[in-house]
């Protein structure tokens, strides 16, 4: 009998230890989850930061004052092509760790679109995003999360650090009601990269006019060279061209007008932009099998000389340095804006300019983490790092740099990018930082259907406008 | 004396952990699924009851209907093409004495590997530039085929990979049944002058019908369960050509934040599974002798 | 003569099948030693010009295969053991203890779980682990893995335990043996074949699980092999040699295990599916 009792005891002790382990974990979670969920109905973002110290107390639970703590940092600088940006981030991380005692960053590199469309939305829903994370501006990203109370209000921090007037006029897509919730790391414009060797070989003019562009594409095609390299597995890649075509054909204000109803996807001009993509698809201007190609494949094909042009963001300029992935054609690449489209509306010198990618910060921070975040912002958003971004990585500064600093640019490709922007009459944003996320994802779904030849331009426009109407109506409520 | 086996506390101790875990991860999620299925929850702030809107929307959703069709293709492919092949292969293996163990071990091997790793491996074989398949095609002077990028080929390519992974598993199942058939029946038929094919068709196949039914049943369940391979190889693309119900559901919920709609879709998948299982039980299994487990 | 040809037909067909199974592995193995994509594209089946063992070192460090491997191993092990133990206890109570009515209710209740396809519960389980605050911890995999195995395991072990004659226990009770000793000393040892089957099924299922591990875990240090490998591919998609190295790393241990335990694994998995 006693033996029985002993074994009952032993087993129940074991069981309760097991259950306690689960229980304590779930309690901890319950605590940290509650402020965010209670904050969401009232949608008052200011409520959560003030509550956060108590909520995250469990994480710094160690009673004795051991100052060691980690801060999670989600970035998208993975793979070879992003190594310059990663080097800058690494330096900022090192510097910040040196400044804040006990701080250790826990870096988590995730592919851009996986982070933006899979991980981050899920973590935002769960209320457990990393403390620092790569964030896009706009209604579908920063503004949505800010309204749900997930993002740290940075207004006091940039005031305190004296950064407020340092930024160019680029914080709107990260702002809600005058408060800033994210900081763009830099900017870019999207245009045409072309292989000057190939163009010379076939006696082609630079694609600065529509006719030259079409002629170049046709000639390359005849010589079994893909006119435009593109990797459309992620539809954001071909969407870059769509966006600029819409700006060119329907006018530079079109993209901004979708959410107000001032412009419609179904308008003849927007449909005409999609028609051009459809026509070019039919003519075989794009990489064969593009729907199975990754973004990196596109650069690969271009570098290998399999394609003569690619429509890409100016950030790619850093790929053509001597020590980078595109070294094979370094010095043989040029960058121009999409030429004026015949019968296009609005300013035909306008170019797309995005300052939508940057960093956001969790609203759920304790004192230590807040310190780390401040130091991180101070070190990353500095003249030094902005200049390094421009010089090493070809990323346009999001902050004001002196002419003297900008004058240090020696990379011809970066100069061309700056030149394109300098000549632009106006700029317009990419619609991905304007429209609601459901609308944006619909543009991706529909564009892939268009590329696959499964939808006509009118169907595409109709489908997107339908989602746009629903989202606009929901926003008006 | 019997009291030892009638101690309610001990009983509870033995049963409760299982019940608690089971309730937490099966029953409770099922209940919440039903609850969320009737809301428009976006994971962040909105959560209103919208009645049957999600379910109505699902059947109006051309992309979801397309993914149902894809599930049906997978189901038809596995039942009408894979199962006959599986039977043939198992008969072949059972007919040989030498290398029987080797064949069995080899064909079974892919089914112990992770579907995601197999997806990566085959994605690489299908690669349009360096992939194995197009390299072989090149030898015969055939232009490269964009296996996973072409809407005409993508689903087929995934089906082949799926078959590659799972056929061996079913072959071994059926093989075991064949080898369990008493030898004397077969020998008697041989003495009567029946050929190998005749014996296989008239003797072996009827005897292993119960296990074939099990394989068909498992194939149906498997066809509804396909999701990893799609997410890893194509993510449902190109342009929805490989989307199945489950991958569409996962993307809707996680990628687009449509938790309400996503859970509604999961309920629809569940109902499909129930209907198919019930139909199969009523139409096929009932008419035959009960399968002896 | 004709007979020997006819007899070799099955071998020819089966060898073709075996080649189809093995060639992808061979291709990956060869590619993993090659220098770059061009070499792979030009000579898919040629031996590498120089054997690039550096790929393996690079993958081991860059891909953190060691981390993923360990995570997979201990998660698959612990949750399979927990699942076996819990199901055995439950099955014992349901089949051997004298609470027939309650037992039959519980049995039916647990069996409902067999009807639910796994991925149907995905979103709701996601929301659940999120609510429990264990998202992005190993608990978020351990608990669903353990729970997910229960219905099938209970069913199978119950079937096995029912076949054990009651006289054994009656004798034990007369000897004054308690319930626990009876469970551990008499019933469990007799049930070992079923337990091994259940363990293998659960272990391999957990080892290969992708959906939950990809979406429930976002910290790199916590990822398991299936999701870690996908992440690795996405990061190094253009370096085929390196990706192939990663595949070799993640496939090899399973194959080695299979080589030693193939009979047990095949028996376990097939038995598992039939009972299910």
Image (cartoon, coloured by chain):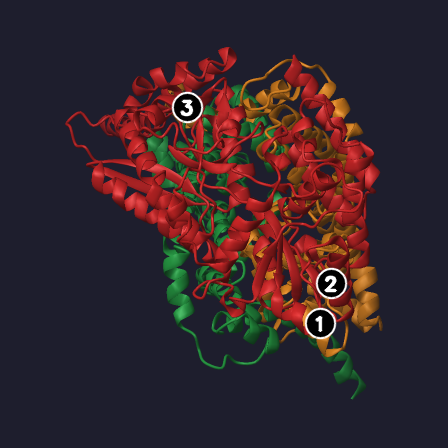
In this rendering, does residue A75 appear at all? yes
Badge 1 and badge 2 both on one subunit: yes
Badge 3 and badge 2 both on one subunit: no
Contact check, label 3 and label 2, Cβ < 8 Å: no
Residue occupying the point 78% across, 69% down:
A222
Which chain is indicated by disc 1?
A
Q: Is residue A122 left or right of residue C115?
A: left
Which chain is indicated by disc 2?
A
Q: Is residue B286 left or right of residue A311?
A: right
Q: Which quarter shows the C terminus of chain C?
A: top right
Give the distance between the C-alpha atoms of the residues marked 1 and 3, in whole angstroms.
85 Å
Q: Is residue A88 left or right of residue C114?
A: left
Which x, y percent locates residue B138? 72, 75
Chain letter, colour red in render: A
Q: Give neighbour class at mark 2: few <14, some 14-19, many 20+ (Cα, 10 Å).
A: many
Which x, y percent locates residue C50? 45, 80
Which chain is indicated by disc 3?
B
Find chain C in the image and tell me its colour. Answer: green
Residue occupying the point 38% across, 48% down:
A405
Chain letter, colour orange in render: B
| Residue that mark 2 sits on | A216
Determine whether C22 is above or below A235 in the image: below
Contact check, label 1 and label 2, Cβ < 8 Å: yes
| Residue that mark 3 sits on | B11
| Residue that mark 1 sits on | A202
């Amino acid at each position: 009998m006693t033996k029985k009792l002993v074994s009952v005891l032993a087993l129940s002790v074991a069981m309760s230890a097991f259950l306690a382990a689960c229980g304590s974990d779930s309690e901890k979670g319950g605590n940290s989850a509650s402020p965010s969920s209670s904050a969401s109905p009232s949608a008052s973002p200011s409520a959560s930061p003030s509550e956060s110290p108590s909520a995250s107390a469990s994480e710094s639970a160690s009673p004795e004052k051991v100052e060691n703590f980690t801060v999670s940092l989600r970035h998208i600088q993975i793979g070879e092509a992003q190594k310059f940006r990663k080097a800058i981030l690494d330096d900022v991380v090192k510097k910040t760790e040196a400044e804040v005692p006990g701080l250790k960053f826990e870096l988590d590199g995730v592919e851009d679109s996986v982070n933006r469309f899979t991980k981050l939305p899920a973590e935002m829903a769960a209320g457990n995003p990393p403390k620092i994370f790569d964030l896009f501006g706009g209604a579908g990203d920063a503004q949505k999360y800010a309204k749900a109370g997930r993002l740290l209000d940075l207004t006091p921090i940039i005031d305190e650090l004296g950064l407020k007037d340092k930024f160019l006029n680029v914080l709107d897509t990260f702002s809600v009601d005058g408060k800033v919730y994210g900081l763009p790391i830099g900017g870019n414009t999207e245009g045409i990269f072309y292989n000057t060797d190939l163009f010379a070989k076939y006696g082609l003019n630079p694609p600065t006019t529509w006719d030259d562009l079409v002629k170049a594409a046709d000639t390359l095609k005849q010589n079994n060279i893909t006119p435009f390299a593109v990797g459309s597995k992620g539809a954001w890649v071909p969407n870059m061209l769509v966006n600029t075509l819409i700006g060119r054909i329907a006018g530079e204000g079109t993209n901004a007008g979708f959410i107000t109803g001032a412009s419609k996807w179904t308008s003849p001009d927007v449909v005409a932009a999609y028609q051009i993509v459809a026509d070019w698809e039919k003519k075989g201007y794009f990489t064969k099998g593009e729907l199975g190609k990754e973004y990196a494949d596109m650069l690969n094909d271009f570098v290998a000389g399999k394609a003569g042009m690619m429509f890409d963001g100016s950030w790619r300029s850093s790929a053509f340095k001597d020590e980078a992935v595109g070294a094979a054609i370094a010095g043989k690449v040029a960058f121009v804006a999409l030429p004026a489209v015949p019968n296009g509306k609005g300013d035909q010198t306008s170019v797309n300019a995005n300052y939508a990618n940057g960093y956001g910060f969790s609203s759920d921070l304790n004192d230590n983490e807040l310190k780390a975040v401040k130091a991180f912002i101070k070190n990353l958003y500095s003249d030094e790092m902005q200049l390094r971004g421009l010089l090493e990585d070809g990323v346009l500064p999001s902050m004001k740099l002196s002419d003297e600093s900008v004058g240090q640019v020696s990379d011809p490709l970066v100069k061309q990018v700056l030149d394109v922007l300098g000549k632009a009459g106006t700029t317009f944003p990419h619609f991905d930082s304007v429209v609601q996320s459901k609308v944006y994802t619909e543009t991706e779904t529909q564009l892939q259907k268009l590329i696959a030849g499964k939808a006509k331009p009118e169907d595409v426009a109709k489908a997107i406008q339908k989602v746009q109407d629903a989202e606009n109506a929901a926003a008006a409520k | 004396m019997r009291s030892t086996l009638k101690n309610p506390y001990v009983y509870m101790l033995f049963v409760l952990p299982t019940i608690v875990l089971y309730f937490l991860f099966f029953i409770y999620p099922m209940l919440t699924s039903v609850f969320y299925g009737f809301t428009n929850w976006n994971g962040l702030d909105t959560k209103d009851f919208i009645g049957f809107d999600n379910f109505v929307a699902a059947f109006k959703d051309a992309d979801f209907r397309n993914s149902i069709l894809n599930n049906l293709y997978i189901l038809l492919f596995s039942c009408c093409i894979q199962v006959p092949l599986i039977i043939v292969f198992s008969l072949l293996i059972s007919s040989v004495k030498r290398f029987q163990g080797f064949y069995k071990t080899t064909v079974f091997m892919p089914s112990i590997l992770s579907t995601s790793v197999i997806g990566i491996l085959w994605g690489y074989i299908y690669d349009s530039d360096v992939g194995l398949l197009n390299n072989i095609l090149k030898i015969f002077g055939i232009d490269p085929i964009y296996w996973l990028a072409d809407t005409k080929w993508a689903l087929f390519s995934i089906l082949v990979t799926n078959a590659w992974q799972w056929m061996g598993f079913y072959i071994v199942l059926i093989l075991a049944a064949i080898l369990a058939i008493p030898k004397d029946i077969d020998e008697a038929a041989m003495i009567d002058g029946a050929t190998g094919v005749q014996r296989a068709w008239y003797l072996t196949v009827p005897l292993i019908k119960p296990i074939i039914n099990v394989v068909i049943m498992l194939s149906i369940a498997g066809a509804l369960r396909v999701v990893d391979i799609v997410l890893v190889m194509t993510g449902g693309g190109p342009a929805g050509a490989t989307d199945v119900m489950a991958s569409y559901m996962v993307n809707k919920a996680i990628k687009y934040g449509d938790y309400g709609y996503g859970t509604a879709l999961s309920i629809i998948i569940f109902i499909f599974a129930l209907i198919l299982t019930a139909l199969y039980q009523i139409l096929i299994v009932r008419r035959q002798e009960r399968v002896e487990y | 003569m004709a007979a020997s040809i006819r007899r070799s037909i099955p071998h020819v067909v089966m060898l073709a099948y075996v080649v189809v199974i093995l060639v992808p592995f061979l291709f990956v193995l060869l590619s993993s030693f090659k220098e770059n994509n061009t070499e792979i594209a030009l000579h898919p089946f040629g031996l590498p010009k120089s054997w690039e063992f550096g790929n393996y070192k690079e993958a081991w460090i860059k891909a953190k295969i060691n981390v993923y491997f360990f995570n997979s191993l201990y998660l698959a092990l612990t949750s399979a053991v927990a699942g076996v133990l819990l199901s055995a206890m439950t099955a014992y109570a349901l089949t051997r203890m004298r609470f027939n009515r309650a037992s039959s209710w519980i049995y039916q209740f647990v069996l409902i779980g067999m009807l639910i396809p796994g991925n149907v519960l995905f979103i709701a389980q996601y929301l659940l682990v999120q609510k429990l605050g264990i998202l992005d911890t190993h608990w978020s995999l351990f608990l669903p893995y353990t729970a997910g195995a229960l219905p099938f395991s209970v069913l199978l072990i119950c079937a096995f335990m029912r076949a054990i004659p009651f006289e054994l226990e009656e004798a034990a009770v007369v000897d004054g043996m308690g319930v626990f000793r009876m469970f551990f000393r008499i019933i469990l040892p007799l049930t070992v074949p079923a337990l091994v089957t259940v363990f293998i099924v659960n272990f391999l299922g957990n080892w290969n699980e992708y959906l939950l591990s990809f979406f429930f875990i976002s910290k790199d240090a916590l990822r398991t092999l299936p999701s870690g490998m996908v992440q690795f591919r996405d990061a190094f998609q253009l370096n085929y040699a390196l990706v192939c190295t990663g595949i070799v790393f993640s496939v090899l241990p399973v194959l080695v295990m299979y080589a030693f335990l193939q009979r047990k694994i095949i028996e376990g998995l097939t038995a598992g599916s039939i009972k299910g």
